[in-house]
Each structure stands twice: as C-alpha cells, then as structure tokens.
Image (cartoon, rainbow, N blue to C red):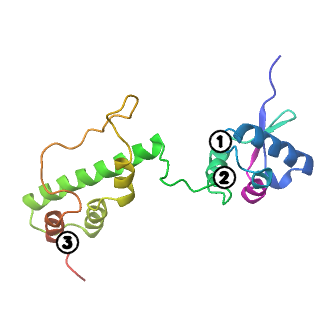
Amino acid sequence: MLSPTASPLPYTQTTAAQRAQVLRYLQVRLRPHFPTLPERSFARALAEFRPDLRRTGPLLTLPALELTQLVQYLGEAPELPLLDPPLYGPWALDLAQYLLLSSELAAGAIVALAAASRTPCAPQLWALFHRLATPYPLAERLVQAHRCDLPGSPPLPFGRAGGGPAPGSPALAHLLHQLAPPAR
C-alpha cells in the first residue's frame, strides 16, 4: 500500500483543531531542545510565526525549512536564559572560519594588486576589498571560543601561506588606500 502524498497547507487556512495538532507536534518534536520553555511560548511562537504546514493524510507537520526557522525563533524566546558565556555550534564556527579566511585571502589579493598596479581599482572592487580586509569581530570571538587541540574538536582550517600584512592592520589599510578609486 502506498503512503499518502504530502500537500501544503497554509497556516491561515487551518482550523483550531489543526492548530492544536501542530502545537502538540511541535511540543513533542522540540521539547528536547527547549525543556524549560512553557507551553504558552510554543503557542505564541506558532501564532506569530504562522508557518506553512505539510499535510500527509490526517497528520500535520512542518516542512524542514519552516521547522528550522521556527527553532531559531524559539531560541530567542525571552523565557529562555541568556547563556553567558554563549554557546556556539559547529555551523557557526564553520561560518566564522570562512569569514576569517576570506579576510586573509582579501589581504593577499590587496598586496598582489597594489604591487602589480599602482592604479586605482573600480569602486565596487575597492568596496569589496575594504569590507573583506576588516576581520569581523564576532567571527574572531567565535573562533577563539573553540579549542582545536581536544579530542573531538573541529580541525583548524587551512589558512593562507606566507606572511604579508594581516587583515585589519595599518599596513593593509595603507595598501588599500593606494587602490582607492578617485573621489568624485
């Protein structure tokens, strides 16, 4: 016997019974993530978020993206304690490492471009270099919050080889100034 196919159901078209069913589904599905969050917080988040639902026969669920977005929304609920120090997951670390490596690559490109050509670059390229050449402070804090020398820790990413001015340094700012487009 084939299982029924899933069909979308906009939240605005649900009945009170269907909303109650989705609320129960969310509480069961997300209770391990938010064990201290009261039921009213789940109900409030669902009413504010108004996610599109997926109906498979009599069952109602949330599509994966909607569920992920709702989890992020619930994670900012005022009833939850603010973790101090904060908890950064592996995906946040990966993104932070990506941003910092992009800054290193931009620094190398600025050095190479300044050495090869003393002419200004296009305004869009200069703006991109200017943005990337400044390390993002949250990314730095996030990477510093993780130790890479412990068993099970994420590995250090490959950096760019060679020296040169560091992202955010005065030397790099000077080279970037040389590449600035003429003022209009």
Q: CA distance from mark 2 to mark 3?
A: 44 Å
Q: Name the amino acid type tagged 2.
A: Leu
Q: Nearer the viewer, mark 2 or mark 1?
A: 1
Q: Which residue shows up at 35% across the image and 59% down it?
A: 136
Q: Which mark is residue 33?
A: 1
Q: Name the amino acid type tagged 3.
A: Ala
Question: For mark 3, what is the residue?
Answer: 180
Q: Which residue shows up at 38% across the image and 35% down it?
A: 154
Q: Is residue 73 left or right of residue 131?
A: right
Q: Does residue 98 appear in this view?
A: no
Observer-nearest of 134 and 118: 134
Q: Which residue shows up at 30% across the image and 37% down it?
A: 156
Range covered by the magenta-colored residues:
44-53
Question: For mark 2, what is the residue?
Answer: 74
| Residue 23 forms part of the magenta stretch | no
Q: Residues within 10 Å of mark 3 (few under 14, many from 20)?
A: some
